[in-house]
């Protein structure tokens, strides 16, 4: 599809263009394997001499249609789908960070990604230095070692709602000859396209707004095609020297800047680790993408209205939403997210754990869930649910004080959402 179309059009029609008499909707290729006339034909696929499909553990046409749409939305050159957001972030990092390498990451990231990097990847011999997203350029610079191979951050962090200064992180990464990887799950490409600000690789938990209906777990990796691996060949031997497990192919030579990262990630990591999204889930994801540009503005409108309502309520101690002018990240949000960020708002109730418990119990529309970024509004008080083993002091140290509530505003009518919150606050 013509890349000059607006993002709204790409959401609806990107990635898949049917030919004469072909299905209008993306076909679900529910097949593990693909048939060939000669062994030689298939051999060419294995050698990466021809493009095509042989086994759905590595690639499937349904997934590739949807990945192509996400690449268009983000302004990238290549993309792939993974079984989850966790798999997307792991693959994006592990594709260029072998044992002995080092990652610089923002400390304000999703808990699952923090564990992935600080615990699981550490066991694989990959170390990390976490920096505050608010660090000075000098502090950021000091976090690098000679083994640093990637920089990682989230456009809007889940759940802290900090906004990443993408240009600051991209500049630091590039001055050290490594790429910036940005998890763009919360704003989605409708509200921010990190590649336009210097990010090299973009990842997603498509489980969130992209699917948007709480229906399918999934992830995506998009390559900007801009990072020049060969210019830093000493740092990225996996891309810039022959791969013995693939008949001596040098990815950066054969597939260029535009295709090397995703081809290697598919040929090696998907082959060996197999975290692929099912074609059925890719189809469901695409249904979500078709309305992403219609849903995101409503999530933002509801998030902003709920944040403003809560801020003016006497029983609310504080509200954290980057769209509020008194928010620490308001200026960065104005720059990177001029149309708003997302529908997730966090706030603290006066009266601590007791008040939070009463409030949660009395919600009618907002459902109690750990999920976020769904068309239906959902709400979580970590102290009385996910983090209930912790005492008040431990909760405070973990950054989830007892009174903290996270609300993910859906796309219902904002008047109904505010009325629900008002009646629950009334009961405290
Ligand atoms: C949820 C989430 C993830 C993990 O995604 P899953 O699909 O749950 O594996 C990663 N990053 C962010 C920002 C998330 O919100």
Image (cartoon, rainbow, N blue to C red):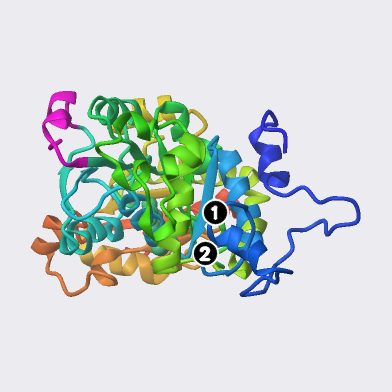
Foreground residue among 80 and 290: 80
Residue 343's tag is none
Please tell me whether residue 276 belongs to the stretch shown in magenta.
no
Q: Is residue 185 visible?
A: no
Say if 12 sits above or below 168 in the image. Answer: below
**What is the residue that sits farthest to the left in this orientation?**
393
Q: Tag 1, which secondary structure?
A: loop
Ligand 1 quadrant?
A: bottom left
Q: Position of residue 208 (x, y in %)?
A: 49, 57
Q: Residue at x 74, y 69 (%)?
A: 37
| Separation of residues labelled 1 and 2 (CA atoms) | 12 Å
Q: How many marks?
A: 2
- 1 vs 2, front mark: 1
Residue 299 appears anywhere in the view: yes
- Residue visible at 21% across and 73% down in the picture: 388
Q: Quadrant of the N terminus?
A: top right
Q: Which mark is residue 48?
A: 1
Q: Position of residue 374 (x, y in %)?
A: 52, 59
Segment tinted magenta in the rendering? 135-148
N-terminal of the pair, mark 1 or mark 2, is: 1
The residue carrying mark 2 is 58
Q: Is residue 388 above or below residue 201?
A: below
């Amino acid at each position: 599809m013509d890349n000059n179309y607006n993002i709204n059009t790409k959401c609806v029609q990107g990635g898949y263009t049917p030919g004469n008499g072909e299905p209008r909707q993306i076909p679900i290729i529910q097949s593990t394997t693909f048939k060939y006339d000669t062994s030689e034909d298939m051999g060419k696929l294995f050698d990466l001499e021809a493009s095509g499909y042989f086994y759905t553990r590595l690639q499937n046409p349904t997934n590739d249609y949807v990945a192509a749409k996400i690449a268009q939305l983000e302004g990238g050159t290549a993309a792939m789908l993974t079984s989850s957001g966790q798999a997307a972030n792991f693959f994006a990092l592990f594709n260029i960070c072998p044992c002995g390498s080092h990652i610089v990451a923002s400390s304000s990231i999703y808990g699952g990604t923090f564990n992935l990097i600080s615990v699981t990847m550490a066991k694989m011999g990959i170390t990390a230095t976490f920096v505050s997203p608010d660090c000075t350029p000098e502090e950021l610079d000091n976090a690098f070692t000679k083994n640093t191979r990637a920089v990682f951050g989230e456009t809007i962090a889940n759940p802290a709602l900090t906004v990443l200064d993408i240009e600051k992180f991209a500049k630091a990464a590039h001055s050290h000859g490594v790429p910036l990887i940005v998890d763009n799950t919360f704003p989605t490409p409708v509200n921010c396209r990190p590649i336009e600000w210097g990010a090299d690789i973009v990842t997603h938990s498509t489980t969130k707004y992209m699917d948007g209906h709480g229906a399918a777990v999934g992830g995506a990796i998009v390559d900007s095609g801009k990072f020049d691996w060969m210019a830093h060949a000493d740092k990225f031997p996996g891309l810039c020297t022959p791969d013995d497990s693939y008949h001596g192919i040098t990815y950066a030579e054969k597939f260029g800047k535009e295709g090397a990262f995703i081809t290697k990630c598919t040929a090696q990591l998907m082959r060996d680790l197999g975290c692929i999204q099912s074609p059925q889930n890719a189809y469901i994801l695409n249904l979500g993408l078709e309305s992403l540009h219609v849903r995101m503005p409503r999530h933002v409108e509801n998030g902003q209205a709920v944040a403003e309502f809560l801020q003016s309520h006497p029983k609310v101690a504080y509200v954290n939403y980057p769209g509020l002018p008194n928010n620490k990240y308001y200026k960065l949000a104005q720059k990177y997210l001029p149309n708003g960020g997302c529908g997730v708002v966090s706030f603290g109730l006066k009266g601590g754990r007791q008040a939070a418990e009463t409030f949660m119990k009395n919600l009618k529309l907002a459902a109690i869930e750990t999920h976020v970024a769904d068309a239906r509004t959902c709400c979580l008080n970590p102290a009385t649910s996910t983090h209930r083993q912790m005492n008040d002091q431990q909760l405070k140290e973990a950054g989830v004080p007892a009174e903290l509530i996270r609300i993910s505003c859906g796309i219902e009518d904002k008047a109904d959402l505010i009325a629900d919150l008002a009646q629950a606050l009334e009961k405290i």
